[in-house]
């Protein structure tokens, strides 16, 4: 049984995803001695053993006492009931034989079941810890400390996969998790990052520290980090329990709040139906775009002067209300995962699309004008809004990203915040990269390559036209 299968069995058996931290801060000890550390941890274990999905001792507080502290850590891990996983919060990270030695220390000498690791040294520094499927690893991805952005939010080049560094870690972890024993650490104080990591690593377990003393909001963390089945997240808490007058009661109340949050999460209208519709209906939607003449193959001169073997004109959608509705529905699963207050549709082709989304998703809509009014209010943004609201930009296509930047500039000028752009088709001509460099995430229902793959598989488009379009993408991407 992989480590996370064991952890999941534990969480379902006791109805808890609460991970109790064993962090014997000096201020919480009766005296600064190894014995006081031992007494502190034993009280916590005795008070919460039937509530804790896992225990997480922080090795630093034990190592601070030297060999005697390490001996206490060994005794504490040994005292934890065998059916409760122990995650050693050690944040190890090294290479070659040193990593092997650290793995032996954690899993053989100390007998922990899992460990937190730093991924900065790459895959070979992680592999020694992953050899045994019964031993787990939580890889630091987006941490809760203020300085996390110094490195974790750096933008990657397109050659490195694009996006932010922590997103790259999430993607790598998804690929490296071949034995059901690799998860991620994402701070509960980083709600947007937590939501983004859940998108990138839909099935991985996430350890989300930061609820309680660090100020993380429990409900927001649950909504962002839980898997669709209401699991896949561990909520580690230490000081809010250990410093309470009655630690057991504090743990019980916290677990009740977590369970209420999970119930609320699961009670939200099921968006998976929309996701299933998109998975099952994307072929039908792709064919509908062809049949409606929204996509044509041949020889076309583009606005840039380039001659293209494919032409996409989504303005045609207004003639086909049924197809327009399907296009709007295809945006929904992406939008359900984003944080925003209003849609901002871009003129002209995206305004009917944004309207279709608004009617189905219930979000209000605004749009930036191409030219400001010269009369009346002289507005540049149509619709009601309030400064500092977050809006998501809706467009039909993405090519280089130029029109997106123009619209974002207008929206920002009136105090609106834009962090995400969603399009139906990404032409793969650099828009995603350009937006990412400006700190804007772009999401698409289709890439042009995906559409070509679908039409080639269905035989809807001749092979020579598909190949010509692929070559054009390669030349202009």
Image (cartoon, rainbow, N blue to C red):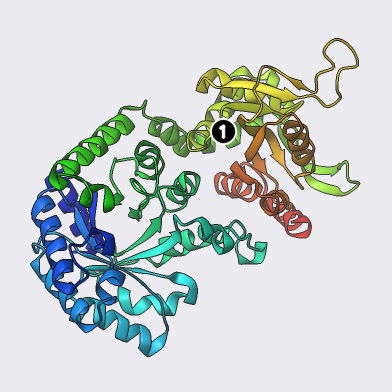
From the viewer's side, name the closer residue of 214 and 236: 214
Q: Where is residue 42 in the image (x, y as percent from the top left)?
A: 11, 62
SS class, disc 1: helix
Residue 111 vs 240, above or below: the answer is: below
Residue at far bottom of view: 97
Residue 215 vs 28, above or below: the answer is: above
Whether residue 277 can be seen here? yes
Q: Position of residue 196 (x, y in %)?
A: 49, 48
Q: Name the residue under label 1.
A: 285
Q: Where is residue 476 in the image (x, y as percent from the top left)?
A: 78, 56
Residue 222 vs 320, above or below: the answer is: below
| Residue at x 69% of width, y 34% of height | 396
From the viewer's side, name the closer residue of 132 and 279: 132
Q: Residues within 10 Å of mark 1 (few under 14, many from 20)?
A: some
The quarter holding residue 128 reads bottom left
| Residue at x 31% of width, y 75% of height | 129
**Left or right: 372, with 466 as reference point:** right
Residue 320 vs 391, above or below: the answer is: above
**Left or right: 161, with 405 as reference point:** left
The quarter holding residue 410 reads top right
The quarter holding residue 316 reads top right
Q: Position of residue 440 (x, y in %)?
A: 65, 46
Residue at far top of view: 376
Whether residue 290 can be seen here? no
Quarter of the figure that contains the N terminus: bottom left
């Amino acid at each position: 049984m992989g480590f996370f299968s064991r952890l999941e069995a534990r969480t379902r058996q006791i109805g808890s995803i609460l991970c109790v931290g064993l962090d014997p801060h000096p201020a919480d000890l009766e005296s600064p001695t190894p014995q006081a550390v031992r007494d502190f941890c034993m009280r916590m274990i005795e008070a919460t053993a039937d509530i804790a999905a896992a225990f997480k001792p922080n090795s630093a507080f034990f190592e601070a006492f030297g060999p005697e502290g390490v001996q206490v850590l060994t005794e504490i891990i040994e005292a934890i009931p065998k059916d409760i996983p122990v995650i050693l919060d050690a944040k190890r990270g090294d290479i070659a034989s040193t990593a092997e030695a650290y793995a032996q220390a954690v899993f053989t000498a100390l007998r922990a079941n899992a460990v937190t690791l730093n991924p900065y040294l790459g895959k070979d520094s992680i592999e020694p810890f992953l050899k045994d499927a019964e031993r787990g690893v939580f890889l630091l991805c987006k941490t809760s400390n203020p300085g996390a952005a110094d490195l974790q939010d750096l933008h990657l080049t397109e050659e490195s996969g694009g996006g932010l560094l922590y997103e790259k870690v999430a993607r790598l972890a998804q690929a490296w998790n071949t034995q059901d024993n690799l998860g991620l650490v994402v701070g509960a104080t980083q709600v947007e990052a937590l939501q983004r990591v859940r998108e990138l690593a839909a099935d991985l377990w996430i350890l989300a520290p930061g609820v309680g003393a660090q100020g993380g909001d429990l409900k927001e963390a649950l909504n962002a980090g839980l898997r669709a089945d209401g699991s896949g997240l561990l909520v580690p808490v230490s000081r809010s329990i250990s410093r309470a007058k009655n630690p057991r009661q504090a743990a019980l109340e916290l677990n009740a709040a977590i369970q209420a949050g999970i119930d609320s999460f699961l009670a939200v209208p099921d968006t998976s139906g929309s996701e299933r519709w998109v998975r099952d209906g994307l072929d039908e939607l792709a064919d509908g775009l062809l049949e409606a003449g929204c996509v044509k193959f041949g020889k076309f001169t583009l606005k840039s002067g380039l001659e293209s073997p494919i032409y996409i004109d989504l303005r045609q959608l207004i003639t086909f209300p049924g197809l327009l509705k399907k296009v709007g529905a295809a945006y929904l699963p992406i939008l359900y995962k984003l944080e925003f207050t209003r849609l901002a549709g871009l003129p002209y082709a995206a305004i009917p699309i944004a309207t279709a989304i608004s009617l189905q998703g219930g979000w209000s809509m605004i749009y930036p004008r191409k030219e400001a009014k010269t009369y009346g209010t002289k507005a540049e943004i149509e619709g009601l809004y309030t400064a500092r609201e977050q809006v998501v930009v809706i467009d039909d296509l993405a090519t280089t990203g130029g029109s997106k930047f123009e619209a974002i500039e207008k929206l920002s000028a009136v105090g609106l915040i834009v962090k995400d752009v969603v399009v139906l088709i990404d032409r793969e001509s650099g828009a995603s990269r350009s937006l990412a460099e400006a700190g804007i995430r772009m999401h698409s229902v289709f890439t042009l390559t995906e559409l070509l793959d679908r039409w080639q598989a269905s035989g809807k488009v001749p092979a020579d036209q598909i190949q010509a379009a692929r070559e054009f993408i390669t030349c202009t991407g």
